[in-house]
Amino acid sequence: MATILVAERSAEQRAEIADAVAAVGHTAEFLDGVDEVFEAVRRSSPELLIADAELGGPGAIELTRRMRQEYPTVPVLLLIDVVNKEAV
C-alpha cells in the first residue's frame, strides 16, 4: 500500500481522488496548502504527490519546483481542471 499525498481544496475533487486511490489499494492524505505538503513529505516519505494546479499560496508550479529541489525522488502529478467552453 502506497502513501499518496493530495493537495486539493475542493471537497468534490477530494472525494473523487479518494475513491480512485482506494480502488487501487492505496491511502491518500489530504492537505490544504504548500506548507502542509512539505511537513507531510518530511514526515511520511510519500510515493506520490498529487496537487491541484490552482493551489493557493505560492501555487502548484512553485510547489513543483521546490519538490524537485528538496525531494527529487517524489513524483508530482499536477491536476488541471479544464472546461471545454465549446462543449457547454
Image: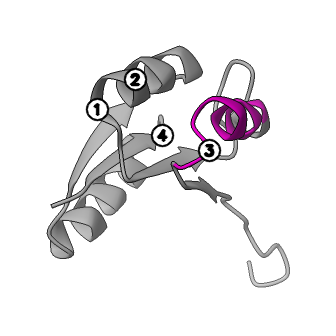
Q: In the rendered structure, are the residues bearing label 2 and label 4 in contact, judged by CB atoms less than 8 Å apart? A: no
Taking the view exactly as shown, the residue that stands out farthest to the bottom is 87
What is the spatial separation of the Cα atoms under label 1 and label 3, in whole angstroms?
15 Å
Circles 1 and 3, Cβ within 8 Å, touching? The answer is no
Q: Residues within 10 Å of mark 2 (few under 14, many from 20)?
A: few
The residue lying at 82 percent from left, 73 percent from top is 85
**On the picture, is 82 further left or further right than 73?**
right
Q: Residue at x 41, y 43 (%)?
A: 6
The kind of residue on which mark 2 rests is Arg
Q: Is residue 67 above or below residue 49?
A: above
- On residue 44, which mark appears? 1
Residue designated by label 2: 42
Task: Identify the residue shown where x is 37% and y is 42%.
Answer: 5
Magenta residues, start to end: 62-73
Which is more N-terminal, label 4 or label 3? 4
Q: Earlier in the sequence, mark 1 or mark 3?
A: 1
In terms of secondary structure, where does tag 2 sit? helix
Q: Which residue is identified by label 3?
A: 72
Task: List the residue tagged with mark 4.
Answer: 8
| Residues under numbered marks 3 and 4 in contact, where contact means CB atoms less than 8 Å apart | no
Q: Nearer the viewer, residue 22 or 87?
A: 22
Mark 4: secondary structure: loop
Name which residue type carries label 1.
Ser
Foreground of the two, 29 or 38: 38
Q: Is residue 9 magenta?
A: no
Point 77% across, 31% down: residue? 62
- Position of residue 57 measured from the top left corner of the image (x, y, whole percent): 69, 18
